[in-house]
Amino acid sequence: MSYNEEKNKVEKSFLYLVATPIGNLSDITERAMKVLSEVDFVAAEDTRNSGLLLSRLGIKKPMVSYHDHNRAERGPEIIERLKGGESCALISDAGMPAISDPGEDLVALCAKEGVGVSIIPGACAAVSALALSGLSTRRFAFEGFLPPSGKERKKRLTDIAKEERTLIIYEAPHRLKKTLAEFSEYFGGDRRISLCRELTKLNEEVLRMTVSSACAYYESTEPRGEYVLIIEGVPEATEKDVAVDIAARAEALMAGGMSQKDAIKTIVKETGLPKNKVYAEVLKNNE
């Protein structure tokens, strides 16, 4: 098998996850072009946008829509066509399908039904922004879009505020100011953030600043384009820091009239630390 033939043949009864450009059309890969040209049909999040992409690439293929609002009924239809011997390329509006995308359900359905799935890797906004951020890439957590509102959003913000890994969050321009204000409330204004927009496009911009600086910047600048937000994680606390925090918190609680026992219970609930560790630190401080 030659280098060019390796894993490049389009097989029948296979779903192909094909990454598409996130902005710059030149980022399409040779293998993606080949697969899109040879599959029997293409499943796309938005057939109008994807139809335009295929047209610009000089590719003509039958298309079906597959998105949040029709995946429950369209997924089984695609599976039946795949089982019948057809091949399909799944694409999103931009980037890697099945990542923060309804394609994840179709892949799960293929796994359940024993249908083969292959990947044609390429552009991904989340990883591209992370690489550009100037923040730690050693460990990171991808959150995609946060819940739009209500208790679920508050809970998610509370949870990720404690996250030690670098955070990756998608945001639309009309919600950016509100989200930054919430970051300031939940994370603190000193947390470093990288705001990446219009990646690979003519107006690509990467802003590296603190959360409070970002809030101030967008008071006079209108957000434009889709954003990928990269947020610094919480620094890992040393044992010394934890001990000081426990002692100070216990002292404050007991100064407010709480018993030592109740103060320990409260700290355990707040921090998630083992009760025996909290008890030992409080006892040490009161010796």
Image (cartoon, helix red, strand yellow):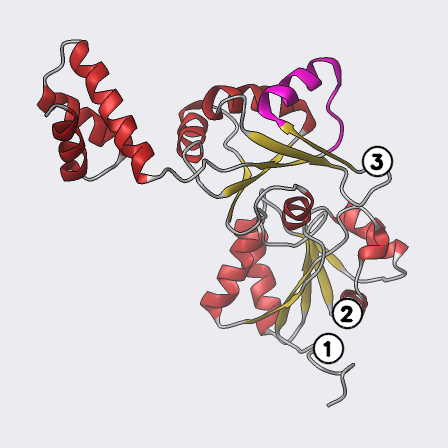
Question: Could you tell me how far apart the alpha carbons at marks 2 and 1 are, in whole angstroms?
Answer: 7 Å
* The label number, if any, that marks residue 31 in the structure image: 2
Number of residues whose C-alpha sits closer than 10 Å to that of mark 1, classed few (under 14), some (14–19) or many (20 or more): few
Front residue of 111 and 231: 231
**Mark 3 residue type:** Asn
Front residue of 244 and 7: 244
Q: Are marks 1 and 3 in contact (CB under 8 Å)?
A: no
Magenta segment range?
A: 210-225
Is tag 2's residue or tag 1's residue first in the polypeptide sequence?
1
Residue 186 on the magenta segment? no
Question: Could you tell me how far apart the alpha carbons at marks 1 and 3 are, in whole angstroms?
Answer: 34 Å
Is 142 left or right of 272, judged from the image as shown?
right
Q: Are marks 2 and 1 in contact (CB under 8 Å)?
A: yes
* The label number, if any, that marks residue 203 in the structure image: 3
Residue 236 position by quadrant = top left
Residue 216 on the magenta segment? yes
Q: Position of residue 137 (x, y in %)?
A: 57, 49
Residue 191 position by quadrant = top right
Is tag 3's residue or tag 2's residue first in the polypeptide sequence?
2
- The residue at 81%/68% (across/down) is 30
Image vertical order of residue 162 relative to residue 53, above or below? above
